[in-house]
Each structure stands twice: as C-alpha cells, then as structure tokens.
Amino acid sequence: MTCSFRPITAAADRDALRGFITSFWRSERMVARGRLFFPAEQEGFVAEKDGQFIGLITFERSGDAVEITLLDSRERQQGIGSRLVELALEYAKNCQCSRVWLVTTNDNIRAIRFYQKRGFDLVALHRNALEAARLLKPEIPMTGQDGIPIRHELEFCITL
C-alpha cells in the first residue's frame, strides 16, 4: 500500500504525534538555537500508511521565514522525507515567505547530506551549542550517529 500525505489536524492528531515523536526521539521536547519547543503542537504534515504515521514534518512561521523543526521518516529511501520537505516549501511559498531554514546537529550526517541534495545551504555553524541545549533537554546524548560526539548545531537555509 502507498502512503498518503496530509496536514496535521489540530485536535485529532496531537496525542498520536506525541507518541510517534517520543518513540524515536526519547522525548516530545526539542531544542534548537537555545529554544525549547514541542513539535506535536506545531503546524506540519504527516505521511500515513495503513492508518499509521510513518513520516512527519513540523514547522514554525516567523515573519518571512519558515523554520523546519522536525523531519522524521520511518521508511527511508522511499521519498517520504523528500515529499514532506516539498510540502513545507509549498506552504512557505503560499505564505509568501522568502526562506525556509532548519537546524541539525553535527553528528547527523544523513540529514546534512539530505538537505544539501535538496538545495539547502549551510549558512551557520553554532559551535558548542549543545552545551546550552542539554541544560534545557538533559536527555540529549553525548554521542550520536556513528559514535560522533554531538557538540554543534548546523544551520541550513533555502531561499525561495
């Protein structure tokens, strides 16, 4: 069965999204650029298959920019993440925003590659940002993917 994509609906999806996020990220809280937020409470899109969430993108609009706050696809290499990013870019264009940006950590090689292949540019390195992030979210591990120490935040942006 193929998956379908749709906007997050306010009340109906929130509890299920909290469970989906927590099952992989160990918490429903996220931190980026020194700010704590809750993706399950934000706008976004979900990918569903057989009535289950298999992908999610959340974002926050501020002025003429949209910040992607979470992208998660449980079925890799199927185009789900790409389609979710396309939907976020379409949303930003429809809102007449001029850019879409996001933050990831230095260990997330998969995300770094993914976003660059889709036209996002690395625009900032926030050295040792995870020291402050761990004060807000202590469960952030010291090491991440492939045993890489998690220390820095990388900021990516695409101009629309």
Image (cartoon, rainbow, N blue to C red):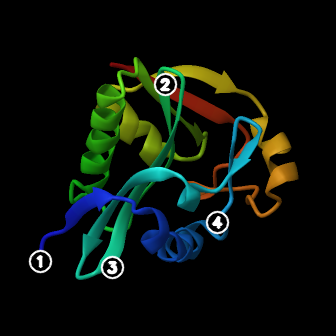
Assess whether mark 4 and mark 2 are in contact (beta carbons under 8 angstroms). no
Q: Which mark is residue 1?
A: 1
Assess whether mark 1 and mark 2 are in contact (beta carbons under 8 angstroms). no
Q: Which mark is residue 52?
A: 3
Location of the C terminus (image quadrant): top left
Residue annotated with mark 4? 28
| Secondary element type, mark 1 | loop
Residue at x 32% of width, y 34% of height: 89
Type of amino acid at the residue the image marks with label 3? Gln
Q: Mark 1 or mark 4, which has the lower sequence index?
A: 1
Type of amino acid at the residue the image marks with label 2? Ala
**How many angstroms separate mark 2 from mark 1 (CA)?**
35 Å
Q: Which mark is residue 81?
A: none
**Residue 7 lies in quadrant:** bottom left
Assess whether mark 4 and mark 1 are in contact (beta carbons under 8 angstroms). no
Q: Mark 2 or mark 1, which has the lower sequence index?
A: 1
